[in-house]
Image (cartoon, grey):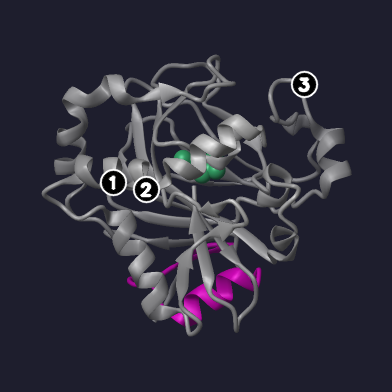
Amino acid sequence: MDTLTQANVLEVSKLSAEALREFFHGNYLALRVPEFCLHYAEIVANLRNKMSEFTHYRMAEDVAVKKIGFTIFETENKPEHLQHYFQHATVYSEKIRNLCHPYQNPMDTFHILLDENWPAGANLESCSMGKMTPCIFRLLEADYSDGLPAHQDVLSRDLPKELKFITLLAQAAGNIYLSLPEEGGELLLWDIKPDYEEYEALKEHRHDFIDTSKLSSEPIVMKPRNGELILFRSDHIHAVSSAKNVNRIALSCFVGYYGDDQPLTYWA
Ligand SMILES: O=C(O)CCC(=O)C(=O)O
């Protein structure tokens, strides 16, 4: 069934409960599904005259990343931003769906396949404030010197009052790659999952990024392919190298694992 292309990386031709279990049990840092989306070029063509809709993260204008949609991370757990996030969750998902039209949003397909394949199903993540939004478009601007620097994504740190999220056993990022530069734009994954105190000690004092010279091991380096879905352990340290000449565009979400007999969840 499965081809192992690289240590720590599982490559499969389609999603299955077995591959997802192997991945969430920590046997692999990444799960790759090549040719997941066959109409990536058409979706990118749709976006061509919508580039002004991509905006920087509100609190990170200096970082090479822009997005369409709104993420929980951007709320910084502030009441006014949280209210906006939960009130507009479906507005953003509809917007992304419309930008893919007449094609199905491949992220919707991914979420359906998670539900179909995972024995306990999969659903949109929610908390006491409401349902979350399912995905964003993300663009890494070409020719910034440092790409997306190393960091770790942990939902319970974004929403510390929502005790449910402490029980997440693993957090992954699901990215469907739509436009990639020939040079640069590699995904770097470290087999390192620091706890809060360890993460604070690794920080380099620019946003939540860390100083990779303090890490004890080398990352695995993956070059995503157009149309590919990559699920990777975003609760481990990861980074994206700078894209050369061409903007790097993907659809992106997180996937949460609470145990084999629990539904998977997804959100942005
Ligand atoms: O675009 C990528 O390959 C990974 C981006 C990232 O850091 C994330 O999804 O958390």
User: Is mark 2 in CB contact (under 8 Å) with mark 1?
Assistant: yes
Residue that badge 1 annotates: 94
Q: Which amino acid lies under the numbered mark 1 shown in the image of this protein?
A: Glu
Q: Position of residue 221 (x, y in %)?
A: 54, 45
Residue that badge 2 annotates: 90
Dot 1 lies on which element? helix
Q: Is residue 205 above or below residue 10?
A: above
Residue under the point 50% across and 35% down: 84
Q: Is residue 80 visible?
A: yes
Residue under the point 57% across and 32% down: 81
Marks 2 and 1, how far apart in space?
6 Å
Residue under the point 62% across and 56% down: 128
Between 98 and 36, which is closer to the camera in this rendering?
A: 98
Front: mark 3 or 1: 1
Q: Which amino acid lies under the numbered mark 3 shown in the image of this protein?
A: His
Q: Is residue 132 above or below residue 178?
A: below
Q: Is residue 190 left or right of residue 42?
A: right
Instruction: Residue 113: give its label.
Output: none
Marks 3 and 2, how far apart in space?
34 Å
Q: Which amino acid lies under the numbered mark 2 shown in the image of this protein?
A: Thr
In primary-sequence order, the first of circles 3 and 1 is 1
Residue that badge 3 annotates: 205
Residue under the point 71% across and 20% down: 206
> Is 24 included in the stretch rendered in magenta?
yes
Dot 2 lies on which element? helix
Total of numbered circles in the picture? 3
Quarter of the image that includes the N terminus: bottom left
At label 3, counting other C-alpha atoms closer than 10 Å, the crowd grade (few under 14, some 14-19, many 20 or more) is: few
Q: Which residues are magenta?
A: 5-27
Q: Is residue 230 left or right of residue 217?
A: left
